[in-house]
Every structure is written in C-alpha cells, then in structure tokens.
Image (cartoon, rainbow, N blue to C red):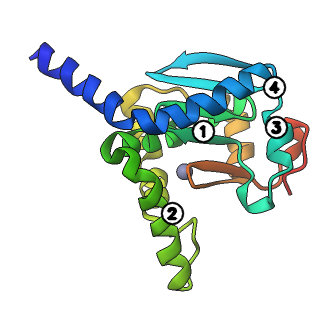
Amino acid sequence: MQTLSAASHALRYAWAAPCSMVGLLLALAALASGATARSMHGTFEVAGGRIPLLVSRLPKILRFSAITFGHVILGVSHAALDFHRGHEHVHVRQYERWGILFFPLYCGSSLVQLVRGRNFYLDNRFEREAHSLTWHFQAMSKISLSDPVMARKNGRNQRCVSGVAVKRSSSRQHGKSQE
Ligand SMILES: [Zn+2]
C-alpha cells in the first residue's frame, strides 16, 4: 500500500514536472536577484529579491502576490506566500491533475469567459475551484494561515489571476505600487 502511495506521489510530481521546470527557471532568476527559497508542504517557494520590482512593472491585470507553476510557487514576499498558500496549493493539485495541459486549459477557460462577457478571472473554472477549496485545503493540510490580522486586512483587497494573487490596494505592505 505504501509502495502504491509512493508511486502515485512520484507520478504526480513527474506529470507536473514540465510546469515545475518553468517555475524553476523563474525561481533561479529570482534567486540570482536576491530572492530566498524554502521548502513548504512539498513545494519549492521563492520570494523577495527583485520579484516585487518586476511585478510592479507588469500591466495592472498581471500583477500578483503569488503565482504557481507546478510545484514551484513564486511570491513578492514570504508573508504573501503565507497568506496565499492554501489557494496556491489548490493550483498545485490542479497541475498534478492536468500536467502541462493546465496552461492551455487555464487560458482557454479565461478566453471562454471573456467571449461570454464574463470576468476572465472570477469565472475561470480553475480559479472558481481554487477559491472554493482554499479554506478546505488549508484545514485538511494543516497549512497555517498567516497572522489573522494580516489575513483580515489583506482579504478585503486581494484576488488571484491565473494562479496569481493580485493585491488591489494594500501595496504599502510590499513597498510597491499595485493599484
Ligand atoms: Zn488562483
């Protein structure tokens, strides 16, 4: 039974590996810019360095606090990763389910919503699932929430786009403009 579980575990990592490689390349670039890494609940988390600066230069719609590629999660700060861990780990499970197909499926879902005149992010099926399962996943995985005061404060201001948590108005926390 344990052998089966280990095999299943290895298969999920292997299936998501092409997406994780994309994240790993970005993570290596971030680490070279001064970001720091940690291993958390089976994922590789990287935050800080020049990530906040680069994110602030993205178009508003693409700015994020955290983003997941397979088993690699990038964030503007480790505090942001703490806050978004539950949500991002739902995306990790989605990558394990869909592998490299996640990229086109996610974009396709957003495109379909746009064509229907809906919100490309809020109505994206992967985001809907992530939002609906975040708290359940945190409870089941015993993934701790960040400081509850921070969680309450940020919860009013954040959303997630394409595995990307976008902060709308609490930019001061990360010392950058994300309006
Ligand atoms: Zn998301």
The answer as to whether callout 4 falls within 8 Å of ligand 1 is: no
Classify residue 45 as left or right of residue 97. right
Label 3 neighbour load within 10 Å: few <14, some 14-19, many 20+: many
Q: Are marks 1 and 4 in contact (CB under 8 Å)?
A: no
Q: Which quadrant of the structure image shows residue 150?
A: top right
Q: Position of residue 155 (x, y in %)?
A: 67, 48
- Element type where label 3 sits in the image: helix
Which quadrant would the C terminus be assigned to in this image?
Answer: bottom right
Up/down of 63 relative to 145, above or below? below
**Mark 1 highlights which residue?**
84
Give the foreground label among 3 and 2. 2
Point 65% across, 28% down: residue: 27
* Alpha carbons under labels 3 and 4: distance apart: 7 Å
Q: Are marks 4 and 2 in contact (CB under 8 Å)?
A: no
**Mark 2 highlights which residue?**
107
Point 47% across, 39% down: residue: 19
Q: Position of residue 51 (x, y in %)?
A: 78, 34
Q: Which quadrant of the structure image shows residue 78?
A: top right
**Mark 4 highlights which residue?**
49
Which quadrant would the N terminus be assigned to in this image?
Answer: top left
Q: Amino acid under label 3?
A: Pro
Q: Earlier in the sequence, mark 1 or mark 4?
A: 4
Give the foreground label among 1 and 4. 4
**Mark 3 highlights which residue?**
52
Point 54% across, 16% down: residue: 39
Q: Amino acid under label 1?
A: His
